[in-house]
Image: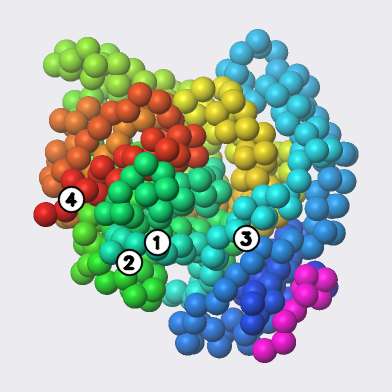
Amino acid sequence: MTAMTGQQSYKAIQMSRRSLLVGAAAIGLSTAIPPMVAIAADAVAAASAAAGEIRPFRAEIPEAALIDLRQRLAVTRWPDKETVTDRSQGVQSARMRDLVSYWQTSYDWRKGEEKLNAVPQFLTNIDGLDIHFIHVRSRHENALPLIMTHGWPGSVFELLNVIGPLTDPTAHGGKAEDAFHLVLPSIPGFGFSQKPTSTGWNPQRIAAAWDMLMKRLGYNRYVSQGGDWGAIISDALGRQAPDGLLGIHVNRVERATTFPTAAAQALMNGAPAPDGLSRQEKRVFGEVRDFVNNGFGYAAIMNTRPETIGYGLADSPVGLAAWLYDKIADWVFTAGDPETALGKDALLDNITLYWLTNTGPSSARIYWENTVSGAKLTPIKVPVAVTVFPGEVYKPPKKWLSKAYPHLVYYNQVSKGGHFAAWEEPELFSQEIRAAFKAMQP
C-alpha cells in the first residue's frame, strides 16, 4: 500500500472525509485540518473497515494548517471588553487576549503532536466509523485491561499523564498488581476519531462500540472509567453489562439518576431546598441550583442547536477557544484560573486539536444525541466505584447513589482536583483508580 504524504493529502481537500487521516506505518498518515482536511482514500478505509483491521496512526499536521491558524489569529475581530469586573459575562477579554497572543506567537503544536506520537495510537473501524485510540500495554502481564474515556471540552490529551502511573505502577509508587493495560479512545466526532454523518451516535451506541473495541483487542475481561461524557458512556456500559465487563469507575456522577426526587422538584419549581436535607445536602443543592441558573447555557445550546453554534466554532479559532476555555475555567479546581491548574501549553494542546480536526461542531452533537435518545434511568448492573473531586460541578453524598449504583463498592471524596481530574491531578487520580478497582477484586 503506497503511503500518502501530508502534502498529497492536503491537496485532497474536497475528497470524502471517510477516514480523516492518511495511514501510519504501512499506511502513511496525516491529520484532518479545517479548512485543509487531510483524508485517506475511500477504498483504503472501506477495505480496513471490512477486515476490522487495526491500523497504526501518527499525528502529522501539514505546516500549511498551522500557518493558516496563525494568520486567522492575527486578524481576529475582537468583541468589546466586558462591562463587569468578574467572570459573570463569560471569558474576560484580558485573559483571552493573553492566551491568543501566546497561541499566535509562542505556542508550538509540534510539541503537542510529539506527546501524542510518543504513545502507540491506532485506528479501527467499528459500526461504520473509524475510531482513534491510544493503546498502551503494561509490562506486567497480569495487568487489568481498562478502557478510559475523556469528555467535553477535553480530549485524549486529558489522560496522557496517567498512562505511566497506571501502566507502570512500580515506577510510580505502586505495586505490580496495580497495573493496567490502557485503551484510551477518542469519542466519535472528537479528535482523530471519524465524525458521524448520520444520527444515532449516542452514549449507548458508543458504549457498545467500546465493548467491541476491547474484544477486538483481545480483552475479554475488562473495566471502564470516565469523567464527563466518559462517565456517561461508562454508565451506559454498566447498564448494558456486556460479558466481560467487570465494573466501572466514574469521577463525575449523573445528576438525573441520583438527585433526590423532592430536591429535583424544588429545583424545577424554584423552591428552597427541602427541609429534610442535611446541611451538606443543602450545600450540594445550592451548588446545583447555581450551575443550572448560571452555568448551564452552553449545554442548553448544544442540546438543542449544535449546528448553529458550530458555524462559529468551525470558522473562528478564537471563538472556538473562548467556547472551550469558558467551561475549562469554570470546572478546574482553581476556578476561573485554568492556566494555573493546567498551564497554557496544555490548554492550547487541547484547543488546537479541536481546531485542526474541526471537531468543535461535531463534538457538540453528542449533547443533541444524548437529548434525543432520552434519559436512561435504570440502575447500573455491574460493580461501581466513585471518586468525588472537590472542584467537580456536582458532588453528591454517598447515600444519594444507592438507587443508580446498587453495587457501589467504593466511594471516596478527595481533597483536591476538579472536573478534569486526570488532567489536573494525575498522581492522585491514578491512586484513586488503583484503589477503586482493587475494591472490586474478589
Q: Which is in the foreground here, disc 2 or disc 4? A: 2
The residue that mark 2 highlights is: 141
Distance between mark 2 and mark 4 Cα atoms: 19 Å
Q: Earlier in the sequence, mark 4 or mark 1?
A: 1
Mark 1–mark 2 contact, CB under 8 Å? Answer: yes
Q: Which is in the foreground here, disc 4 or disc 1? A: 1
Q: Is 18 a magenta residue? A: no
The residue that mark 1 highlights is: 138
The residue that mark 4 highlights is: 440
Q: Name the residue rendered at 72%, 82% in the picture.
A: 3
Three-letter residue code for mark 2 = Glu
Label drawn at residue 117 = 3
Point out residue 347 in the picture as x, y percentages from the top left corner: 63, 38
Instruction: Tell me if residue 160 comes above or below residue 323 in the rendering.
Output: below
Q: At numbered mark 2, what does the secondary structure look like: helix, strand or loop?
A: loop
Q: Name the residue rendered at 40%, 63% in the picture.
A: 139
